[in-house]
Image (cartoon, rainbow, N blue to C red):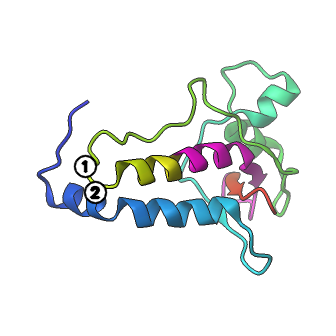
Amino acid sequence: MVEATHLRVSKYLLEYILPYLEAYRTILQSTRSDHFWVAMPKYTTKREVGELAGWHSAYEDRGILSLVMEPGEYTRPMSLTAPENPWHINLSPIKEGKEQTKKVVDEITKLLNGVKVIYYRPVQSVKVQSRQLSRRL
């Protein structure tokens, strides 16, 4: 892996990595009942529905569901498929506060297993969209 710690953006991210990770952990924990967190990935090739339905592995959810879902329809929340390798965040560039950062990262990787996903079609002219939800929704 190539590290570019001399770049301004890299320096900034490394300086503020812990507060960013702590904020992300807060979102994933979702302990407040008056705040709900939903992520909308720009594009996904996930296969939660396809795996449940037994579709061939060449078919991804977004494409097939765009053919069958009507505007306003959505799927039930289901667990986000975990990656083949465990979730991870590269901590090697971090020089200060690595132990505290590692603790937060370990919590985040555990919380990622609780993320739910739904597919939603807002209008006919828009393809089905993936929404990733915190475990409390």
Callout 1 amino acid? Lys
Query: Disc 2, disc 1: CB below 8 Å?
Result: yes
Q: Residue at x 25, y 49 (%)?
A: 95
Residue 117, image x, y percentages: 74, 49
Q: Which residues are magenta?
A: 106-127
Disc 2: which residue:
14
Q: Is residue 103 above or below residue 121?
A: above
Residue 39, image quadrant = bottom right
Residue 95 numbered mark, or none: 1
Quarter the C terminus occupies:
bottom right
Callout 2 amino acid? Leu
The residue tagged with tag 1: helix, strand or loop? Answer: loop
Residue 33, image quadrant = bottom right
User: How packed is label 2: few (under 14 Cα within 10 Å), some, or many (20 or more)?
Assistant: some
Q: Residue at x 70, y 35 (%)?
A: 81
Q: Is residue 137 above or below residue 79?
A: below
First of labels 2, 1 by sequence position:
2
Q: Is residue 46 above or below residue 111?
A: above
Q: Is residue 112 magenta?
A: yes
Q: Is residue 83 magenta?
A: no
Q: Nearer the viewer, residue 109 or 124?
A: 109
Quarter the N terminus occupies:
top left
Q: Is residue 51 above or below residue 93?
A: above
Mark whose residue sits in front, 2 or 1: 1
